[in-house]
Structure formats: structure tokens, C-alpha cells
Image (cartoon, grey):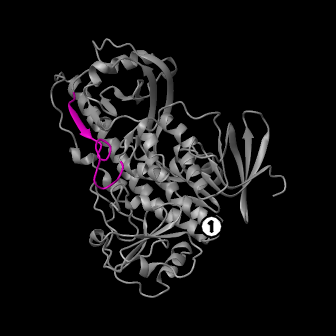
Amino acid sequence: MPGAEAEADVLIVGGGPVGLTARALLERWGVRVLLVEKHRELSPFPRSRLVNVRSMEIYRQLGLAARIAARAFAPEYGRIRFRDTLHDQDFATAAMVGVNAPVPESPVIGVVTSQDRLEPTLLAAADAQTRFGAELVGLAEEDDGVVASLVDHEHGGRTRVRARYVLAADGANSAVRQLLGIDTTGPGAMGDFTTVVFHADLNRWCARQPAGVYFTAHGSFAPLYPEGGWAWFGPTPDDAAGADWPALVARALGPGAEARAEVVRVQHWVMNAFVAERFRHGRILLAGDAAHAVPIIGGLGMNAGLSDVHNLCWKLAGVLRGWAEPRLVETYETERQPVAHETLRQAVANAHLLFQVQKRRRDQLQSGQAASDQIELPWSERYFAQLGFVLGVTYRSGAVLADDTAPPEPSERGTDYFPTAEPGHRMPHLWLARTRSTLDAFGEWFTLLTPDPTRWAPRTPTPWPLRVEPLPAEHTGLCGLGPRGALLIRPDGHIGARWPEHPPSEAALHDALSAVTCPALP
């Protein structure tokens, strides 16, 4: 491209967890990546607090799970507590399933950690070029690529970058989405909120009853790091410019708390709730909050964005490396947009239920009821058992070859997760060896799991990256396989095809890989 100062296979716009994870995934595939972030450094704010069990599986695949867990809170912090003020007793509590303790459905456990603790680990996980202080201000599409115009806030001036694809992970106020004129659907802004980061000694009320977040009638508290630090967040007051933040925090701490809050920084933000009408515009793709911004209650937003790029990056790599047709990238929107709408519904429901609890408790206290009086919650502890939304995601597209054994999918997933090896589902975690999971067999390749590897091994090299793995006989029943059956697992860990019995022909595997990577148009 004449006049372009730099080139990349994929230009990633946005240096948050979603963009940084995409950078690491694409680098594993050997894709040339340039990531640009308009801010001059990683965000100093804690922001997202939860890395759920599915996201930790992705980071296990990248070799990062142990590193992330080492800097996170202990599992007992995987709990929420409801109090009138921080120094009062709980009037309700609930565990975060898959975070507060291991679950048999996964080889990993989710963690409570702050985004500003996670991002440096992700940045160090890849060597791909990254430019901070570079803001995208224009996009021009061509037949075989996209030209991006950038403003350099560090040195001044503009540069142009030509990329085969652009991945927009630039947040709820995405400049890319706005430049493309992509509209959104959903409730929209659900309120203005403020996060106050502060130092205080709160061990007296929290050390023996740890939690990832304490919801109170006057805002919520979250411990930031195992070694110390706190955040309070709540509705932004009308006079935010003149607000006495230490006083507001003290009110939420409660009378007689005798803890002084040393305010470090304050950030105002909007709780958004929407899904983009399109996730793709030609060679430009939206991911994370740029594609779907959901309320923070339940910790679903960032994690959904991580699954976005886990779904997308192998498809981009396949097209760029020549073993997949460009229309494979179109299945990204087909597969992930329904998940985004379902995630939005759940997160909005979470937020409304939380607001109900807080309002009901404030009304009780204003009517003179004692702080020790119990409040009837609009949910049970089961409400927080969201493994169905985390591990039960199912894809339906041309990149999944459905078989005749799969029952009709429910319109919405419940909180329960039921492991299944039906096409489109995440391959269940099963132990292949003492410390090796089926999930450890997946990576920058397709995986064929079968109790009869000899019969299924390709006789000649294939254009696709492929590994054949033996499946222990004790797992064939759960997988719906006979002694000569097989599962074809996509690089994102979702099942692309299943043969319950023997291969129907010598070309069965070849034909399936061809169909998954060159899907028919709907």
C-alpha cells in the first residue's frame, strides 16, 4: 500500500485484557500482529475483578494460568457478601461457583484478581509489537486489507498502518464501531457510577470473612490485591466535582468503623448494556466491550470478550496461513452474537436483582428496622451457580457439523452445566493422564480424539494442523462413542464433528476438516 508506514496481518485496536489476549493467541499461530492503544500505558484502575473458570482454561492453554493464579486472591475470596455497612454482619452471602473451590468439570479454578494485576501478565506473554499512545482516527477498506490512520500522542503526527484484518477491542465507546456506523441494541446506559481506590486497614471486619466483593446499602467494597488496597464503587453523586470522596467511603464503612480512607484515585464510568448489531464489517471485527457491553454484576463481561477472541483468532490464523477460506471468519459473528445476547440478558438480570436487594435493605433501615433483621433475597445461592453460562456455551454455524444424535438446543441455558460431547459444545474436561486433561490436548491445531488412533490416522499429510490423540476407553460412553468412533475438536476446544462409530469413509476426516474450515454460506 503506497504511503503506509507499517504493515501487519492483524491490527488490534485496544490494549485491555481482550486485545492483549488476542495478541498472545495470534502470536502463537505465527501471525504478525500490531496492537495499538490510545492511552500511554496500561490502565491503573482495577476494573474487572473476576477471571472465570473458562477464561482460566484459555490461559492454561497459553501457559499463563499458574502465573495469573499466583498473583490473585486465595479461593476463599470467591464469595460475595451483603451487609448494611462494611463493619456490619452479613445479612446474606453466596459462593461464586468455580471460583471459591475447584469443580470436577474443569482442571482449573477461576480467580478473583484486579484487571491492573492481570494486564501486565498478558502484556509480557507475547513479543508482538505494541504501541501505546497511538489512537486510531480513521479506517479505509480495500479489497485485500484495511488501512488505519493513527495519531501518535507521544511524538505527534500521524501514521498509517495496512493490515489484512482489524480486530477492534477498544471498549464500550469503541472508536472503530463508531467509525463504521454500527448501531447497538439493548437497554443502553444503566447509570453513572464511580470507583474510588483507597487505602485503609479493614482487616478487623473482613479478614475472617473474606470476599471478592461486599455489597452494602451505600455502595460496594472490593479488596484489590492480596497485599492490600481497596475500591469502593457506587452511583455517582449529583455534585461529583465537589464530592467529598473520603466522607462517602466513610459513610459506607459505617458509623464507628474508625477506619480512615486515604483516597488514591477516582474514576467515573457508565454501566452500559448493549450488543452491537453487527460484529463484522468486511475485514474489521468487533470483540469484547466493543461488541457487547454488559453490567459488571456477575463478572460476565470481560470473560465473554476473552471467549470472543478465543473463538476468532484460530479462524483468522487459518485464513492468513492458507488452510481456511475467508468465509470461516464470518462464523465468528454467527457463533458469538447469540452468546452475547444471552450474556446481556443474564447480566442485566443480575444487576436488577442486586439493585432490588440494596433498595429493599435501604427501605428497611429507613423504616427503623434493626440492622440485624433479615431480608428475603430474590434468589437462592443457586443463582450464582453460573457454570451453565460459563462452560455450556454452544455454537451453531457452518464451522460445526451437527450429527443426528444431538437433541434440540434450549432457547436459553440455565445455571446448571451438563457435560456433553455433542458437536458445537466445549469438549468436556476428562483426564487423559494423572495431570493431563483433554483440554491440554488442544492448541494451535485440530485434535482428533479417538479410542482407535490407528484407524483414524491420516495416511498422507493434510493441509490442516492436526494431531490424533488416544481417548481412554473409560471416557467413550460420556462422549457418545463406540470403540472406533472419534471427535474432531477445533482449536478453540469446541467440538467440530463427531462420528459415534467407525469412519464412514476413508475421506471422512479430510471432508470434515474441509467443511469446518471452508463452511457453506447460510
Estimate the x, y position of residue 278 in percent, counting from the top left: 55, 59
Q: Is residue 96 visible?
A: yes
**Which residue sits furthest bottom?**
505
Residue 520 seen in the figure:
no
Badge 1: few (under 14), some or many (20 or more) residues near its Cα, within 10 Å?
some
Where residue 408 appears, x then y in whole percent? 32, 72
Between 143 and 388, the one lying in front of the other is 388
The magenta region covers 90-108
101 within the magenta span: yes
Location of residue 488 (image quadrant): bottom left
Q: Main secondary structure of the magenta part?
A: loop
Residue 361 image position (x, y, % from top left): 24, 30
Residue 301 or residue 387, whichever sits in front: 387
Q: According to the image, label 1 marks what residue? A: 319
Query: Does 17 sit above or below residue 452?
Result: above
Left or right, 266 with reference to 414:
right
| Residue shown at the point (47%, 35%) measured from the top left | 47
Q: Position of residue 501 (x, y in %)?
A: 34, 82
Q: Is residue 440 left or right of residue 169?
A: left
